Every structure is written in structure tokens, then in C-alpha cells.
């Protein structure tokens, strides 16, 4: 039970950590000042949520590890984030499309996690969903603005969605730890969220003058620790200080 709960917390938190790190790369590089600050604030929101999850994970395991150890001292194969969130910041269309795809899932997921029998997870979800509702509003507004904008912005948005869509299916994949905790009323049965996700995504895309791609083959592996080539570069940046100066304290 303890190990399953720990792994499940990582599945939730690692998505926020890696996407937060990706968005942090944009600080000072946004298309304009307002958007730059918005992306940085979303990154900070996600990292704040990560702290709550990792603090709880450390309490669950009671093996001396801290939230920093969990965040910075694991090997690549020990991270449980989906492949979607580690995809690179190719251009602003990719950034917004990736954010929208995750935000929609994240919002639906937290709505259900609020009802978890695990009171700590329920409390984190109830606090986080307020931030995530803003994240979804931000990314969906930009989807519409760019998708229904100029011919060039529409072309770029459709290209980004086409490239990233093969990664959406993994969001709903249930791990062995998740399956065990669903029976306990702790984990969210994400398979049940997929229909609502697709219906909502289709509506948003139609408003944005974009077409939902038809994909037969999906990319998976992140939840079991098999990541894309991008993950190593992310961790090299993320973990540098802790690896270079072991046991460093602020």
C-alpha cells in the first residue's frame, strides 16, 4: 500500500515538475511581457503543487528522504511523468498546444481527485484546482486567438496539435499502482475521464478553427520510466546544483 501510494503521488507530481521546468525555460523569452509573466506564474503554480505532493510522498515513505531528494536525486527511469510534458518548446504554438492538452486533463483529473479517500491528496487537489482553472482559461484563450487568427498562426497551431496529439492517450493510462489504489477509493479512474476530455477538446478546437487529428498509434512509456531523448537534458538543468554540491542546504 505504501509503495503504491508513493508511486501514484509521483505520477501526479512529476507531470507538474517537468512541465513547470519547461515553462521556466521561457522566463525572459515570451512573445511579450504579459505572456512571459503569465507562463512564469503558471510554472510557479505547478512547482508549488509539486512541493505539496513531494512533502506528502516523503511522509508516506518515512525513509529520511526530503522533498528535495525526491525532486532532484532520482535517476531518469524513476520519474513517472508522461511524455507530453517533456516535449520541447519548439515555438509558441507548441508551447500553447502542449499546455492546453495538459491543462484540460489536469482540470478534469483534479475535479475527481478532490473526492479521494486520501485526505491529503484531496486537500492538495482542492487547493490546486483553483490555479489549474486559470491555467486552462489561459491556454484555451490562446488556442482560440492563434487558431482563429492569421493564416500563419492557424497553420502553426494545427501543425503543433498534429505533432503533439499522439501523446495525449498516455495521460489516461493507468499504472499498476493506480489500479490498486482505485479499488481503495484513493486514485482516480482516468479511463472514465477520456470521453469528457475528447468532447471538451473537440469543442475548444472547433472554436479555434482547428481540426482534432485522427491518430492510430500513440506514444507511451513515460509513466513506466521510459522517456524521450528530451528528458535527460531537462534533468541535467534541473538537477545540476544538487548533483554538483551534494547535501547542499539553503
Image: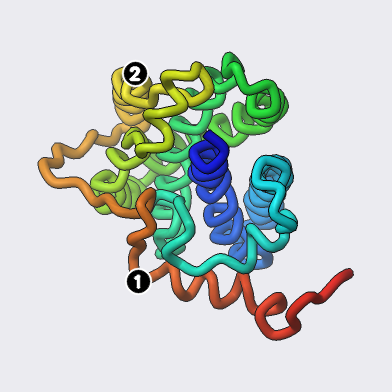
Tell me the residue at 49%/26% (across/down). Answer: 187
Relative horizontal placement of residue 219, taking residue 113 as reference (left or right) = left
| Residue 201 in the image, given as x and y percentages of width and height | 35, 27
Q: Is residue 208 visible?
A: yes
Task: State the separation of the CA atoms marked 1 and 2.
Answer: 31 Å
Secondary element at image label 2: helix
Determine crowd level at label 2: few under 14, some 14-19, many 20+ residues with C-alpha closer than 10 A: few
Write down the residue under mark 1. 229
Q: Work out which quarter of the rendered image holds the C terminus and state it.
A: bottom right
- Please name the residue shown 45% across and 51% down the image: 80
Q: Is residue 241 above or below residue 26?
A: below
Q: Furthest-left residue in view?
A: 216
Element marked by disc 1 = loop
Instruction: Tell me which numbered mark, 1 or 2, is placed earlier along the sequence.
Output: 2
Residue annotated with mark 2: 192
As drawn, which residue projects farthest toward the bottom?
A: 244
Q: Based on the displayed image, in which of its 4 quarters is residue 216 positioned?
A: top left
Residue shown at the point (33%, 30%) measured from the top left: 205
Q: What is the total number of numbered labels drawn onto the structure image? A: 2
> Residue at 81% across / 76% down in the picture?
248
Amino acid at each position: 500500500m505504501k509503495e503504491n501510494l508513493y508511486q501514484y503521488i509521483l505520477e501526479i507530481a512529476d507531470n507538474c515538475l517537468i512541465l513547470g521546468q519547461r515553462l521556466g525555460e521561457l522566463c525572459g523569452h515570451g512573445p511579450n511581457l504579459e505572456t512571459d509573466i503569465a507562463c512564469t506564474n503558471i510554472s510557479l503554480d505547478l512547482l508549488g503543487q509539486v512541493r505539496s505532493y513531494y512533502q506528502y510522498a516523503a511522509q508516506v515513505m518515512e525513509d529520511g528522504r526530503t522533498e528535495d531528494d525526491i525532486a532532484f536525486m532520482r535517476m531518469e527511469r524513476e520519474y513517472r511523468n508522461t511524455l507530453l510534458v517533456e516535449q520541447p518548446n519548439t515555438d509558441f504554438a507548441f508551447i500553447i498546444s502542449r499546455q492546453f492538452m495538459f491543462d484540460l486533463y489536469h482540470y478534469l483529473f483534479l475535479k475527481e481527485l478532490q473526492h479521494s479517500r486520501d485526505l491529503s491528496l484531496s486537500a492538495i487537489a482542492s487547493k490546486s484546482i483553483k490555479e489549474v482553472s486559470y491555467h486552462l482559461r489561459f491556454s484555451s484563450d490562446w488556442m482560440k486567438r492563434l487558431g482563429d487568427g492569421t493564416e500563419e498562426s492557424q497553420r502553426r497551431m494545427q501543425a503543433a496539435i498534429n505533432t503533439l496529439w499522439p501523446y495525449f492517450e498516455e495521460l489516461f493510462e493507468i499504472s499498476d499502482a493506480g489500479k490498486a489504489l482505485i479499488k481503495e477509493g484513493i486514485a482516480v479512474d482516468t479511463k472514465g475521464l477520456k470521453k469528457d476530455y475528447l468532447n471538451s477538446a473537440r469543442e475548444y478546437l472547433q472554436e479555434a478553427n482547428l481540426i482534432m487529428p485522427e491518430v492510430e498509434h500513440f506514444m507511451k512509456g513515460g509513466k513506466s520510466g521510459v522517456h524521450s531523448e528530451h528528458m535527460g537534458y531537462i534533468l541535467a538543468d534541473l538537477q545540476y546544483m544538487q548533483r554538483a554540491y551534494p547535501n547542499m542546504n539553503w
